[in-house]
Image: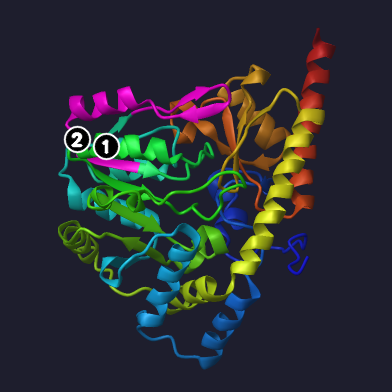
Amino acid sequence: MKYNFDRIIDRNGTNSLKYDFKAEHGKPEDVLPLWVADMDFQVAPEILEKLSAAVEHGIFGYSEGKDAYFQAVAGWYERQFDWEVKEDWLVKTPGVVFAISAAIRAYTREGEAVLLQQPVYYPFRQMIKENGRIPVNSPLLLEDGRYRMDFADLEDKIKTNKVKLFLLCSPHNPVGRVWEEEELRRLGEICLRHDVIVVSDEIHSDFVRQGYRHHMFASLSPAFADITVTCTSPSKTFNLAGLQVSNIFISNAGLRRRFQKAVSQTGYCEVNLMGLTACQAAYESAESWLAALKEYLEQNLSFVRAYLREQLPEIRLIEPEGTYLVWLDFSGLGMTEEEREALIVKEARLWLDSGVIFGPEGEGFERVNIACPRQTLALALDRLRDALRKRTAADKAEC
């Protein structure tokens, strides 16, 4: 393989949220972190080359993207998703969560309802509450190992709560669904019927497994585009989260003006130089790196699937269709939330994302980031297996 994804890179002492803030999060110093969604892989050499040139230049003044930046971003979405965007649709922000928060302020008033589908990326609910709005949940339904939307419930919640803003996660984090075109069209028709604006978080769109296809929600019809704020970023795809750059597309001029005003009210104006540089380089030059990465991640997923089947049959994999996050069902262990936390953190010495933070529907689940060298993944699973066997042996001894 041209790129060495097996290389172990020590991230300790780099101000890494994933590795350097264990004590601050109440975790033992020896835990192995597979929680927050960034990767343990060095970025594509084509990106490093452009960043190195910017560092060598040595001046880090105010910066802004020019036409080449837009062409790089637009070219990516046209090549990958057959979605044509215009330059005046683009609003740059330091992150997708920032954009979601701005959209909540732009399109709703305090005390109004915002709809989401739990279990879902936990900042959705956090941003709704932090901005003084009311979260309304239309839970996803788990049937035969696959999640689906409850359209009847969703429409009822919209009508009952006078919802005017909906937060869509596509592909879905944490359950790994890649929504089918028919599902998205049905959702869009409901939103059109009730004048609901859709904020579509499509940050994981580049991680879709073979046999599935990601559809940009706004691309499905001009009517859908007219009610949609599409949130994109190179951060998950190319491991650039710390450089804080996102590209938000809003074709409706009125919605865009309201969004821009909400962003301006925060005092934010220019994306940082390194974010601009890395984003442009990624979309222009790092496609082969991404292809190799996706192949490696597919092998990691195969490793996890086989390991669970052979060594940890009590834990069920919810088969992912997209993202590099796996959603594991621990309910077969028959443990309480506290018992499972003790098993994972204190006994297995792992730091995962407990499913309950994604909503009560996530209780009994854990989200695991598999974007790491296979050696790291194997170590984590070995720790979990050994801790569970030790606990089982102890329970038998007591009996």
Residue sitting at the far top: 399
Residue 109 in the figure: left or right of residue 191: left
Q: Measured from the top left, where is residue 224 in percent x and y?
A: 27, 47
In this orientation, which residue lies closer to the viewer: 399 or 70?
70
Residue 353 in the figure: left or right of residue 332: left
Question: Which residue shows up at 67% across the image and 59% down it?
Answer: 293
Q: Is residue 87 above or below residue 186?
A: below
Local crowd at mark 2 within 10 Å, few (<14), some, or many (≥20)?
few
Range of the magenta residues? 138-167
The amino acid at mark 2 is: Arg
Image quarter hosting the N terminus: bottom right
Q: Is residue 201 above or below residue 368?
A: below
Local crowd at mark 1 within 10 Å, few (<14), some, or many (≥20)?
some
Marks 1 and 2 sit apart, C-alpha to C-alpha, by 6 Å
- Is residue 372 rendered magenta in the image? no
Q: Which residue is mark 1?
A: 189
Question: Which residue shows up at 27% across the image and 37% down it?
Answer: 189
Q: Measured from the top left, where is residue 187 in percent x and y?
A: 32, 36
Q: Which residue is mark 2?
A: 193
- Is residue 144 rendered magenta in the image? yes
Tell me if label 1 and label 2 are in contact, CB under 8 Å: yes
In this orientation, which residue lies closer to the viewer: 107 or 130?
107
Observer able to see residue 133:
no
Q: Measured from the top left, where is residue 387 in percent x and y?
A: 77, 31
The amino acid at mark 1 is: Glu
Observer able to see residue 198:
yes
Q: Is residue 88 above or below residue 184?
A: below
Q: Is residue 165 above or below residue 238?
A: above
